[in-house]
Image (cartoon, rainbow, N blue to C red):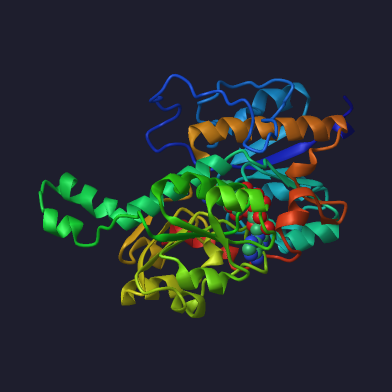
Amino acid sequence: MTSSDSRKVVCVLYPDPVAGFPPNYARESIPALASYPDGQTLPTPGSIDFSPGQLLGSVSGGLGLEKFLAERGHRFVVTSDKDGPDSVFERELPDADIVISQPFWPGYLTAERIDQAPNLKLAITAGIGSDHVDLQAAIARNITVCEVTWCNSISVAEHAVMQMLALVRDYIPQYGWVVRGGWNIADAVSRSYDIEGMNVGVVAAGRIGLAVLKRMKPFDVNLHYTDRRRLSPGVEGELGLTFHETVESLVGVCDVVSIHCPLHPETENMFDDALIGRMKRGAYIVNTARGKICDRDAVARALDSGQLAGYAGDVWFPQPPPNDHPWRTMPNHAMTPHTSGSSLSAQARYASGIREILECWLDGRPIRDEYLIVQGGALAGTGAQSYTEGDATGGSEEAARFTAS
Ligand code: NAD
């Protein structure tokens, strides 16, 4: 390898556990999957340098890439210091060839940062959802943007189902009574309902949305969906789905709405005061898609007024959210940090997928079409199906307030 073949890979990952790395693992292994639900193969790297089930998504895990990149003579910089002009991420960008980042702890690649990185040719998302990249700027600069399609779709679907049940049954406060040492049944059940018989709808029935519908079917609920692409009559019939042409129509009939569309200009702020106002009083929203699809203050207002009975999800804007973000303290929420797609099971798949993508890129082989969001100056692959052109990174600089607040 000549020095001109050497690439600089800058990788932004979430911080290591506060209790130290590596952690003690609860289980010895994770199940091996044969394929994804639509038959797509799991990642196919030449080899991996980790054991599936290990913590790979934080800085010391390094997505299991350190040895592989070092052996090939590439520079690998891993940091969690990602926000503000003095951050390691911003300092390392000017000569970076490849950036790897995660939706959970996004290294926002705004147009300004892309301008500062003249060598940047490839932006990889360790997960699914590339809205932390200014896709319009990537299109203009001919930067390839890709993600590991399917790697954590089922992980998210499981989390969304868990949170629907947590909200409707009001699980979190009941757990709180146990931990505090009480036995206050009347308090604990005063907001608790069965989901059976309710109208449950998803906004977008792509990989995750459809997986949620399939998982909710055995709960004997009435299932609804909206999407800009309609599912086949066979799937609609098998799951007993009601299709809605518009999100307004869907929210008007649903008791529980789970959001699963990507964040792009068409979906930013979709759930504002007006749309939430069209929902039934006492409806629930679960949002594991992206925080910015919901208007931050409209959600908090609707919980305060009782228009919404509950809100849950794991996605915020920006990430990490400042400690004074209203979703931390609003009533009747069941939020988690952005964890649904970063279970240890999911990490094994996205780390393998990143290795596959890097092997392809560095060897001059094409990246799978289904992993592509932007290529050749246009939306491509999954990006062409699920996104619109434009930028959704506006306001991301507020993430720098996290440590200060
Ligand atoms: P997908 O590409 O399979 O599905 C997206 C669906 O959204 C498509 O069916 C598309 O037609 C639909 N859509 C796009 N714009 C729409 C609009 N304006 N109205 C209605 N439908 C619209 O993607 P997926 O794997 O199901 O993932 C969906 C999103 O979930 C990701 O883009 C990401 O933002 C989020 N996600 C979150 C996590 C997490 O950890 N919380 C993990 C993975 C993905």
Q: Nearer the viewer, residue 286 or 136?
A: 286
- Residue 38, above or below 223: above
Q: Whereabouts is ligand 1, in terms of quadrant? A: bottom right
- In x, y percent, where is residue 303? 35, 71
Count of labels in the image: 0
Closer to us: 105 or 306 = 306
Residue 293 visible in the snapshot = yes
Image position of 241 (left or right of 330): right
Relative image position of residue 24 (x, y in whole percent): 39, 24
Question: Could one spot residue 392 in this view of the protein?
Answer: no
Q: Is residue 245 left or right of residue 160?
A: right
> 294 above or below 213?
below
Left/right of residue 279 with respect to residue 71 in the rendered view: left
Give the residue at x 41% y 23%. Answer: 27
- The C terminus, quarter of image: bottom left
Residue at the image position 88 percent from the left and 52 percent from the top = 376
- Give x and y (percent) for residue 2: 89, 27
Give the quadrant of the N terminus.
Answer: top right
Image coords of residue 44 (percent x, y): 72, 26
Residue in front for this viewpoint, 114 or 129: 129
